[in-house]
Amino acid sequence: MNLHMLECFFSKKYAGKGKELFEGLSIWEEEKYRQLQGDYPVIFLSFANIKG
């Protein structure tokens, strides 16, 4: 869940949606972090469905 939250915060896919997703959370209260929201391309890999 933490990795998904980081993807939503930094990914360009969610740029401009930061206020609706993160308002009320402590990360949104800091201006320096709000400026970083939606600025980076993010590659999200999950190995949850891989059977060994």
Image (cartoon, rainbow, N blue to C red):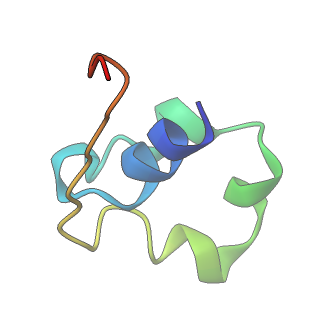
Displayed quadrant of residue 50: top left
- Horizontal arrangement in the rendering, residue 31 relative to residue 17 (left or right): right
Residue depicted at 51% across the width and 45% down the height: 3
- Check the image and report above or below for 28 versus 32: above
Q: Residue furthest bottom?
A: 32
Whether residue 30 is visible, yes or no, is yes
Residue depicted at 53% across the width and 41% down the height: 5
Q: Which quarter of the image is occupied by the C terminus?
A: top left
Q: Residue furthest front?
A: 52
Where residue 41 sits in the image (x, y, percent)? 17, 67
Q: Which is more toward the observer, 12 or 47?
A: 47
- Check the image and report above or below for 50 versus 7: above
Where residue 19 sits in the image (x, y, percent)? 51, 42
Displayed quadrant of residue 24: top right
Q: Which is more toward the observer, 52 or 46?
A: 52
Residue depicted at 37% across the width and 23% down the height: 48
Q: Which quarter of the image is occupied by the N terminus?
A: top right
Residue depicted at 55% across the width and 68% down the height: 34
Whether residue 19 is visible, yes or no, is no
- Horizontal arrangement in the rendering, residue 41 relative to residue 11 (left or right): left
- Check the image and report above or below for 45 versus 43: above
- Horizontal arrangement in the rendering, residue 48 relative to residue 29 (left or right): left
The number of numbered discs placed on residues in the rendered structure image is: 0
Where residue 44 sits in the image (x, y, percent)? 26, 48
